[in-house]
Amino acid sequence: MRYFICALFFVVSAAHAQNTTALPEGAASPKATLNDISWMQGHWSGEAFGGITEEIWGPPLGGSMMFSFKLVSDGQVGFYELGHIRELDNTLVYELKHFHGDLKGWEEKDEVQSFKLVKVDGKRVYFEGFTFEKVSNDEINIYAQIGDEDGSAEEVTFNFKKE
């Protein structure tokens, strides 16, 4: 599996892409609540990186929305992500950790990948390097800046349909 798949969601570029953005230097995240992204809840599936993707989002509960992600290629789990979007200081933060198919973590034990909220705009919620878009009640897109081993980054679209 190519290195950049292993770096999925791990390296976020500060450069602006078509559907993703970053918080300007020194700017604070806007006020927001989980109600702004509660439409993500559900069981979603799609295709990416030559495999099948699955993403499951729980409803808002306890100040967060928990999720799991799985990539299956050639009948094997490529990796998992576990994380949440949580309310923190009157805004939202997107946080996650990665795991190999055998559940060995990618990040150090206490390390969490954390992405600040940039803006909420209609059916889109922008975090640094990620955008969640509600296409319909049965379809979403997640746009992500994914780093490559040479230090470059590209925007990748994950299209999911509700199960």
Image: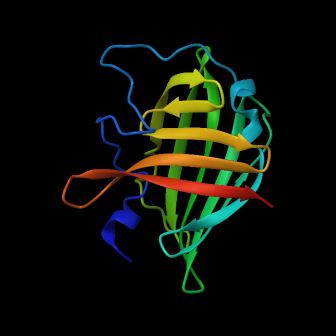
In this rendering, the answer to whether 141 lies above or below 24 is: below
In this rendering, the answer to whether 89 lies above or below 80 is: above
Image point 66% across, 57% down: which residue?
A: 160
- Which quarter shows the C terminus? bottom right
31, 137: nearer the viewer: 137
In percent of width and height, residue 76 lies at 57, 83
127, 87: nearer the viewer: 127
Residue 150 found in image quarter: bottom left
- Which quarter shows the N terminus? bottom left
Image point 80% across, 44% down: which residue?
A: 137
Image point 53% across, 14% down: which residue?
A: 30
Q: In this view, does 98 lie to the left or right of 2?
A: right
Image point 34% across, 19% down: which residue?
A: 24
In percent of width and height, residue 161 lies at 72, 58
20, 60: nearer the viewer: 20
In percent of width and height, residue 74 lies at 54, 86
Q: Is residue 50 left or right of residue 39?
A: left
22, 104: nearer the viewer: 22
